[in-house]
Image (cartoon, rainbow, N blue to C red):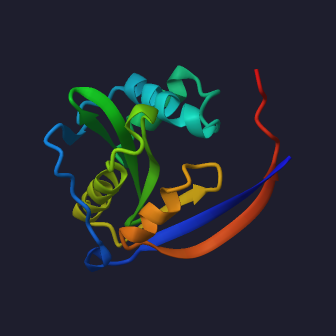
């Protein structure tokens, strides 16, 4: 078993956003306005593999279709030089927007793209008429994740601790 700490953060006003924009002309973020559940599944597996994301690994194609087809979900892809650099998903529920998934591809970690991608996610959440934007991160995520959320102006509102089975080594 391994101890895992989950930290919940929120932003309650767009005025709290401390943006960080990229000066890299090769970096761009675009919304996937055509819903393709296979893209959501691919991004979840591709980005989440490094961080042990497992909650959706057993989903059927039908469940992925329902998830990605929901009008309460928006998906954004980050590109660098035409390659997928990362992504995030926004999920709206009762006027609140959750940054449901957020991450960079391993090849793009350490290139100062996490701050600009998170800035974009927060800006898009506020444009979507959020009354509150929230996210959770855990001690299994990249060590800079929590710092990035706080640097963009998000505030911790709760933490929890649990013991999880250690990942299998194959």
Residue 161 percent location from the top left of the image: 75, 63
In the image, 84: left or right of 25?
right
From where the camera sits, is residue 62 visible? Answer: yes
What residue is rendered at 37% in x and 49% in y?
72
State the residue lying farthest toward the front.
110
What residue is rendered at 58% in x and 23% in y?
60
Relative vertical location of residue 117 with respect to residue 135 in this rendering, above or below: above
**Image quarter (top left, top right, bottom left or bottom right) of the C terminus:** top right
Residue 160 percent location from the top left of the image: 71, 66
The answer to which image quadrant residue 3 occupies is bottom right
Residue 116 percent location from the top left of the image: 28, 54
- The residue closer to the viewer here, 23 or 42, is 23
What residue is rendered at 26% in x and 79% in y?
15
Residue 102 percent location from the top left of the image: 44, 47
State the residue lying farthest toward the right.
1
What residue is rendered at 50% in x and 69% in y?
9
């Amino acid at each position: 078993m391994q101890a895992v700490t989950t930290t919940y953060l929120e932003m309650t006003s767009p005025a709290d956003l401390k943006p960080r924009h990229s000066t890299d002309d090769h970096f761009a973020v675009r919304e996937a306005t055509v819903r393709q559940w296979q893209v959501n599944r691919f991004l979840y597996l591709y980005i989440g593999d490094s961080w042990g994301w497992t909650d959706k690994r057993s989903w059927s194609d039908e469940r992925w279709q329902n998830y990605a087809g929901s009008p309460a979900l928006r998906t954004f892809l980050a590109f660098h030089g035409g390659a997928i650099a990362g992504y995030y998903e926004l999920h709206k529920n009762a006027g609140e927007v959750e940054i449901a998934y957020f991450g960079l591809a391993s090849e793009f970690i350490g290139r100062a793209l996490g701050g600009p991608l998170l800035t974009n996610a927060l800006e898009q959440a506020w444009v979507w008429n959020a009354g509150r934007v929230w996210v959770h991160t855990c001690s299994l995520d990249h060590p800079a994740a929590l710092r990035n959320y706080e640097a963009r102006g998000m505030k911790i509102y709760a933490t929890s601790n649990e013991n999880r089975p250690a990942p299998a080594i194959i």
